[in-house]
């Protein structure tokens, strides 16, 4: 899908005023953070596992060409087909071509962030009846919205909103009574069951691609991916090239990290390894298996200073622990990847000029890095993007001037001290202790008082005065 | 201020631009704590700012120029002590600015080896006994992000405050979550910052504490300013003020009449 970068500020503003969103985010935040914390307490070696996760990903990325080749050979040996897609358009075309070749009419989809990234749904919906089978994805598909979280795409929706959506789409009615969650889940399950049975094509993502076996690993808590990939005639998986791991051993380490970091589970309800299409002796499974391997900017990142972002396993822990994400939710970020990982990935995939607010709307507090299962230095990467903005003159002119004026003064200590003394004297005339309104500080005083400088001058001024009066050299 | 022995560690105080300008009391409390612990404290005149606003805005040339100035200014001290985790953390980042300049890289690393945030310097280097201060009341502590995650400061302030028999420390929920200050963030995205500081204030007031302490003036000014705008009667101070027993000045942003 296209980036809706135009106005981060306006979307953030709207989000801050949305009480439903706030309730939903409050609930989600507590749940994810507490569950992760307790899952990690139960695994004393978690820090060691994080380090192993980092090493596995770094090793794979350093030898990605070899592992890609091995993976492709093994997929083909198992009767599958690999399609390389250089960009989003190529990925959409590859999927559409497979669907057309299979004379498909109905497509059932399990959740795939790579699919979201390339705007797969919009492309498919023109030609095929396309239904999302992950409950969260199904809800936002009905609402015609993008996901607001990478593992809980409808986290921003309240039960009342979902009741209204289901009433409208399933019963063509408005204003029905608020329904209980199990009732809503049962209803979705009933609708989706028919879609599973009728689909010609099943599309999934892949949490990991396993080079040594040519398998893909999929984790869900709903089992929808298993139905999507086993009932239809054709299974298409789409995944970024960075999803590779060398073997099953490494995949199992990564799975332990992923489940705990994402949902605080030891293991997700369904963890499935899929190797090729149906074999002769298999009781079920698709006739064809296709894997669309997506580059879309990733190989460029391999060669630059943002390579470590390719370690990302899309667990969502960074956004769950991000106080900015908790304040504004995922839609404010304007594209499919929100939160800290999105603040790096969106500029990487869509261009810094189209997402220049994202690296700035961050306090660099570092909580994301402290929970990242593969130790991505997110604050460092986010801050590096600011260097690029400054170099490319994307930093607003006013900000540049203010910064450079400040820096000019900071390099001239005597002048600096004169300036701070005078400024202090001026500020102190605005009130006692604090001021509600301060010229040029409207952004600060909109919501806060400004504590005013204490009486008696700057520290430097007072320190030197005290030393002089003690008879020492100032 | 006591006279230190001749073999006393020579400490250069990097007072930080915010303390220098808004709250000199924190600077004096810092000197007091260091001198009581037997240090010889000096305040070199050529100091201004650590360069963080430029660094965090991507202006690397200016950051380097400021970093060189700080490195020069503090080259002669055994230790450089900073009453802020954020600014001390910035000095710790200097070496990466000079990846392509061996000489300055070496000098920057040398500075890093000598640079400490105040509270962790008192516990981890000087190993002082927690001072017994006359402070009394119910306190809660906000862990500022850079100090916590970059420099590992969490237990140190609590250990130091434990020396005062009349201080009750009540931990707030999410004491380690950002208050929404974030340097220029709070004026670039004031509405998001406001939501974040409101969340912090909800956790502070839920403890029932009468005073909030922290180790970074930026965060403390942000929280104090918002508390005062909301008319909430929680006093805010830098931990150094309390540890130095320097309680006669009004809390941050407070009026004599508050």
Image: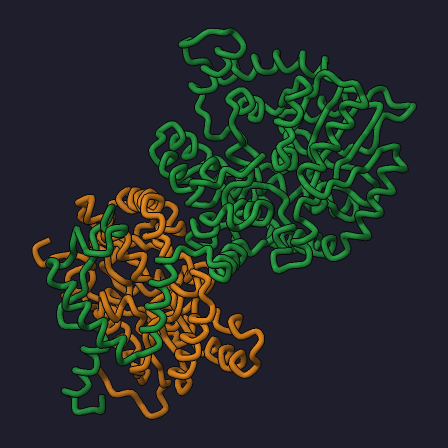
Chain colours: A green, B orange
Is B225 on the left or on the right of A137, as rendered? left
Count of marks, rendered view: 0
In percent of the image, x 57 and y 26: which residue is there?
A137
Is B74 on the left or on the right of A182, as rendered? left
Residue A109 at x, y percent in the picture: 67, 25
Residue B8 at x, y percent in the picture: 35, 87
Task: Name the residue furthest right.
Answer: A280
Is A392 on the left or on the right of A282, as rendered? left
Vertical placement of residue A352 versus A273, above or below: below
In percent of the image, x 50 and y 7: which residue is there?
A172
Residue A173 at x, y percent in the picture: 46, 7
Q: Where is the C terminus of chain A found, in terms of image quarters?
A: bottom left
Q: Quadrant of residue A97?
A: top right
Q: Where is the N terminus of chain A found, in terms of image quarters?
A: top right
Residue A6 at x, y percent in the picture: 45, 40
Q: Specify whether residue B109 is in view.
A: yes
Nearer to me, A206 or A43: A206
Task: Name the residue furthest left.
Answer: B257
Q: Specify whether residue B143 is in view.
A: no
Nearer to me, B192 or B211: B192
Q: Quadrant of residue A238?
A: top right
In percent of the image, x 65 and y 30: which residue is there?
A120
Nearer to me, B58 or B234: B58
In percent of the image, x 36 and y 57: which residue is there?
B184
């Amino acid at each position: 899908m296209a980036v809706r970068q135009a106005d981060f500020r306006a979307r953030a503003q709207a989000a801050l005023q949305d009480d439903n969103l706030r309730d939903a985010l409050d609930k989600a935040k507590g749940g994810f953070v507490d569950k992760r914390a307790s899952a990690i307490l139960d695994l004393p070696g978690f820090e060691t596992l994080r380090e192993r996760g980092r090493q596995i990903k770094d090793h794979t990325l350093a030898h990605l060409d070899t592992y890609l080749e091995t993976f492709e050979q093994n997929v083909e040996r198992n009767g599958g087909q690999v399609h390389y897609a250089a960009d989003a358009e190529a990925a959409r075309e590859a999927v559409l071509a497979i669907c057309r070749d299979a004379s498909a009419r109905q497509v059932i989809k399990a959740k795939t962030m790579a699919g979201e990234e390339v705007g797969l749904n919009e492309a498919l919906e023109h030609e095929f009846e396309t239904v999302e089978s992950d409950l969260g994805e199904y809800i936002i598909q009905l609402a015609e919205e993008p996901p607001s979280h990478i593992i809980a795409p409808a986290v921003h929706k309240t039960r009342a909103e979902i009741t209204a959506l289901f009433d409208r789409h399933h019963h063509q009615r408005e204003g029905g009574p608020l329904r209980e969650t199990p009732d809503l889940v049962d209803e979705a399950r009933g609708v989706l069951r028919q879609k599973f049975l009728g689909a010609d094509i099943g599309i999934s993502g892949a949490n990991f691609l396993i080079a040594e076996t040519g398998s893909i690993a999929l984790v869900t808590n709903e089992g929808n991916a298993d139905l999507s990939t086993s009932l239809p005639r054709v299974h298409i998986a789409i995944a970024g090239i960075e999803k590779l791991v060398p073997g099953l051993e490494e995949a199992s380490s990564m799975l332990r990290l992923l489940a705990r970091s994402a949902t605080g589970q030891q293991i997700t309800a369904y963890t499935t390894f899929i190797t090729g299409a149906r074999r002769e002796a298999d009781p079920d499974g698709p006739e064809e298996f296709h894997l669309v391997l997506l580059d879309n900017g990733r190989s460029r990142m391999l060669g630059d200073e943002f390579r470590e972002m390719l370690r990302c396993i899309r667990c969502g822990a960074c956004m769950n622990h991000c106080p900015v994400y908790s304040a504004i939710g995922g839609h404010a970020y304007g594209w499919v990847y929100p939160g800290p990982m999105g603040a790096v990935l969106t500029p990487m995939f869509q261009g810094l000029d189209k997402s220049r607010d994202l690296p700035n709307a961050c306090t660099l507090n570092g909580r994301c890095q402290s929970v990242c299962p593969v130790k991505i230095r997110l604050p460092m990467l986010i801050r590096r993007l600011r260097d690029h903005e400054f170099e490319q003159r994307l930093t607003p002119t006013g900000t540049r001037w203010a910064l450079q004026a400040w820096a000019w003064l900071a390099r001239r200590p005597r002048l600096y001290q004169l300036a701070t003394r005078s400024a202090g004297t001026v500020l102190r005339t605005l009130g006692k202790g604090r001021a509600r309104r301060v010229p040029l500080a409207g952004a600060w005083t909109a919501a806060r008082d400004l504590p005013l400088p204490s009486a008696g001058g700057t520290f430097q001024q007072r320190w030197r005065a005290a030393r002089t009066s003690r008879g020492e050299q100032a | 201020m006591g006279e230190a022995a001749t073999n006393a560690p020579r400490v250069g105080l990097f007072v930080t631009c915010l303390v220098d300008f808004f709250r000199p009391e924190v600077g004096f409390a810092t000197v007091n704590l260091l001198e009581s612990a037997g240090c010889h404290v000096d305040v070199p005149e050529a100091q201004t700012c650590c360069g963080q606003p430029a660094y965090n805005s991507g202006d690397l040339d200016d950051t380097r120029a400021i970093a060189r100035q700080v490195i020069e200014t503090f080259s002669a001290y055994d230790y450089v002590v900073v009453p802020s985790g954020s600014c001390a953390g910035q000095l710790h980042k200097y070496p990466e600015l000079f990846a392509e300049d061996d000489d300055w890289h070496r000098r920057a690393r040398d500075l890093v080896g000598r640079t400490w945030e105040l509270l962790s310097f008192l516990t981890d280097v000087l190993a002082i006994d927690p001072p017994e201060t006359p402070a009394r009341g119910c306190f809660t502590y906000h862990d500022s992000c850079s100090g916590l995650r970059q420099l590992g400061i969490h237990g140190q302030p609590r250990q130091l405050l434990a020396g005062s028999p009349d201080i009750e420390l009540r931990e707030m929920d999410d004491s380690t979550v950002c208050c929404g200050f974030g340097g220029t963030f709070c004026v670039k995205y004031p509405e998001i910052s406001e939501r974040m500081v409101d969340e912090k204030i909800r956790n502070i007031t839920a403890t029932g504490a009468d005073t909030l302490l922290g180790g970074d003036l930026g965060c403390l000014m942000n929280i104090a300013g918002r508390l005062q705008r909301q008319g909430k009667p929680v006093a805010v101070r830098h931990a150094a003020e309390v540890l130095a027993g320097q309680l006669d000045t009004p809390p941050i942003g407070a009026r004599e009449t508050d």
